[in-house]
Each structure stands twice: as structure tokens, then as C-alpha cells.
Amino acid sequence: MQNNQQYTETQSSIGAWAKETFEENKGFQQATIKLLKLEEEYGELLNEMSLSRKNPTKEDIDAIALELADMLVVMYGIAECLNIDLLESVDKKMEINRRRKWKKQPSGNFKRDREAL
């Protein structure tokens, strides 16, 4: 999905909102607490996905989109706690992933081919 839309929220605006709303501080301990929240959001996403498994409606997809957004908000919060620029980290990781070789598994998933280093 290619989209040139300008978005309002950024990692720092979300971090500032969380600090103001939840009186959060930065640091590893706060990031660890947020990791538990990410697990909760993951469970909610799984629930939405399983409810609409066969023929998802637009409402189902919208609900899934909001759960994915919740997860991203929490991940931004974790990154903020640790002074990590998440988008910069994504760029670095994708550079690594693009250099790797991938092998299709019998399940249909792809896994990094460790023999093709």
C-alpha cells in the first residue's frame, strides 16, 4: 500500500502524550512495563483476527487496523523510553533483511536461509 499522505502523529508526539497522560518516565523499567501492554494488545489483535477469519467485513478490517495501531503506539512508547528512533531502526533492519536470502517453508512461511550467508 503506497500512500503519500502526511500523518499527524509521530513517535515523539505519541511519547509526549503518554508522558502527560500516564505520567510516564523514560528508562528500561518503563519499557519493560510497556512490553506487557504490547502483549495485551497482541492478544486483542489475535481475537479480532480470529473473529473475522473467513470473510472479514470492512468493519472487521477497521477493527483489525485499530488493534495494529494500538500495537504501534505501544512500540513507539517503548522506543521513546529507550531513546530509540523506531523508524530509523526499521530502515536499518530492512537494509539487513533485503541482503538476506529467504527460504519458503512447507507451511508456506518464509524463514531466513542461514546456509546462504
Image: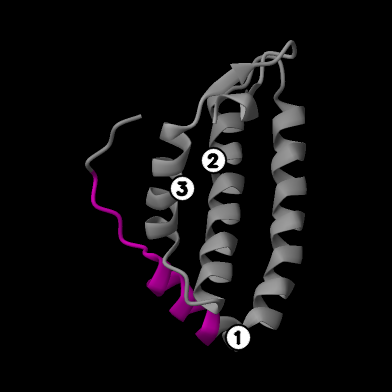
Query: Magenta stretch?
Result: 5-20
- Residue assigned mark 1: 24
Q: Is residue 5 left or right of residue 93?
A: left
In the image, taking residue 99 as reference, residue 112 lies left or right, namely: right
In terms of image quadrants, where is residue 31? bottom right
User: In the picture shown, does residue 22 fall above or below 98?
Assistant: below
> Magenta segment, principal secondary structure?
helix
Question: Is residue 64 found inside the magenta-colored segment of the image?
Answer: no
Residue annotated with mark 2: 65
Label 1 vs 2, first from the N-terminus: 1
Nearer mark to the viewer, of 1 and 2: 1
Q: What crowding class fits label 2: few (fewer than 14 Cα within 10 Å), some (14-19), or many (20 or more)?
A: some
Q: Residue at x 60, y 38 (%)?
A: 64
| N-terminal label among 2 and 3 | 2
In this rendering, does residue 112 appear at all?
no
Residue type at mark 2: give it. Ala
Look at mark 3 in the image and give the residue it sits on: 93
Q: Which mark is residue 77?
A: none
Viewer-nearest residue: 76 or 98: 98
Mark 3: which amino acid?
Answer: Lys
Q: Residue at x 65, y 80 (%)?
A: 28
How far apart marks 1 and 2 lie (CA) works out to 26 Å
Q: CA distance from mark 2 to mark 3?
A: 23 Å
* Quadrant position of the N terminus in the picture: top left
